[in-house]
Amino acid sequence: MSRLMVNRRKFLTGASVATAGFALTGCDAFDAYLGPDAKTRQVLEGANDLTYRVQRLLQGRDALAQEFGEADIRQPMRPNGVTKPEDKAYQSLLADNFADWRLEVTGLVEKPMSLSLAQLQAMPSRTQITRHDCVEGWSCIAKWTGTPLSLVLDQAVPKASARYVMFDCMDTIERSLSGSILYYGTIDLFDARHKQTILAYGMNGKPLPVENGAPLRVRVERQLGYKQPKYVRRITLIDDFAQIGSGKGGYWEDRGYDWYGGI
Amino acid sequence: MEHFSSEKPKNQAAAGQLIYRQSIWTRVTHWGWAVALFFLLLTGLQIFNAHPNLYIGAESGFGYDNAILRIGAENTPDGPLGFTTIFGTKFDTTGVLGWSGDPPRAIGFPGWATIPSYYDLGTARVVHFFFAWVFVGSIAVWLVASLINRHAWRDVVPGVWDIRALPRDVIDHLRLRFHHAREYNVLQKLAYAGVLFALFPLMIASGLAMSPGANAILPWLPDMLGGRQTARTIHFVVMLLLLGFFLIHMVMILAAGPLNELRSIVTGWYRVDDAAEKERGR
């Protein structure tokens, strides 16, 4: 019977070549292809569009994010991003317990509005216990109470050309030489009209705390945390976000995160 | 050409015969997921670095402890220390996990193990999800092709006869005694079937269980895997198992004859042992 015996020298040579190859590849060989303007990156970013389309197709309009029970709330909601806005405008509103705060609803709407917290709270509300998934990888379950965004949109009556809802916030997320940048973000009307998309003013049975976005934050339960802005002051209906910020549709999107945060 | 001759040239009788072993579908999809898994691994480690802890349950314990793994850095009288805590036992992993690089910094997995080499969660996610589609596409093509050309049942899934041959095959492997035949040996079948029918599906399922969008489509999926954070832990453990498979795969290829094995997965043609051919003919 003929057997192929392992040639030890061949084996060792092969093994060392393979090891060297593997060690070389992991380092910075791909960095140059992945910068914000690299062509390769633009191709790779197309996958997010595919994910968006496939998930939208399979979700339909009404598929709900998973909801939990009271017993699943085992800890305070983990705050992230800006947790204590130092902006003067915000601080003076906070000092007055947001009595002078107004939510502006503007842009491509028939009836621009300015709503006080009391007016929002007087509208029908929705309460949901959901799992907040951060892009970093952690999750935290909390109970959210707020006004369905669809009710606010119904009152403002979006024009036919409106495609996205933009949220402008009161917290400075970054100070740079060109000035301070306030957090902002956009979602499509599909998510804006979703049953679980609420303008939350309550959390775990209490008024929304400052670190979690008081007086008002958005809950977009089928997407990650960075798509759910805190400290909201204005809702603008727009048809395109190419001219806003760096044109990617949000503070984090302008810094390389995918616009669709459903994955 | 030698390939197309069923008669071996007499002067090469000892070398065995070239046979067409791997179909184009097997070869193309093999390299599809090989490339995809390379990028998925290195961008996955980068994504993990954004929160280098693993938990059991639906959520991450901040007010209580449900972590089974934590990688981090801390200051000690002797300077910064990288540590890894697994099931409550803390290990000093300075230089590799928690604290590494030049200049050293607090980072889960070191720069040489991640894409990009610097910390960039957004970019890693862009690359990861692109290759996730390549990976899923390769598996889908392989599955359809291998059900049609019967590769899956004929070559990969072990049968009763294979299980009977298991003890002898284990001994052969331990002695580094390899038979080169058209068929995979039983340990090969178990390894390939395990990867294709257990690890790959589990990797995709645990990945989807982490997507809030997919959760709305398949609300039972995270629950089935023990909650979203357990799914994240499973995703990580399956990565380790696939890495283990890859290392053994490489060692086996080198031990069994790298040129012949590589030719077979590139061109499809494989040189079989005379002995194996004779056994088959009996």
Image (tube, rainbow, N blue to C red):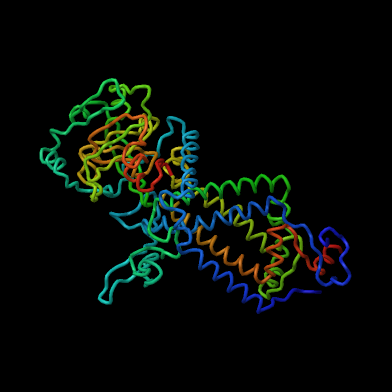
Instruction: Count up the numbered dots.
Output: 0
Relative to B154, A230 lies left or right: left
Relative to B274, A113 lies left or right: left
Q: Position of residue B243 (x, y in %)?
A: 53, 62
Q: Residue furthest bottom?
A: A9
Task: Name the one closer to the observer, B42 or B102.
Answer: B102
The quarter in which the C terminus of chain A is drawn is top left
Q: In the picture shown, does residue A240 fall above or below A47?
A: above
Task: Name the one closer to the observer, B58 or B111.
Answer: B111
The quarter in which the N terminus of chain A is drawn is bottom right
Q: In the picture shown, does residue B267 fall above or below A8?
A: above
Residue depicted at x 43% and y 50%: B125
Relative to B241, B100 lies left or right: left
Q: In the picture shown, does residue B122 fall above or below A69?
A: below
Residue depicted at x 62% and y 55%: B31
Q: Position of residue A59 (x, y in %)?
A: 46, 34
Relative to B23, B133 lies left or right: left
Task: Name the one closer to the observer, B130 or B225.
Answer: B130
Q: Position of residue B222 (x, y in %)?
A: 45, 46
Q: Position of residue B260 (x, y in %)?
A: 72, 66
Q: In the picture shown, does residue A233 fall above or below B91?
A: above
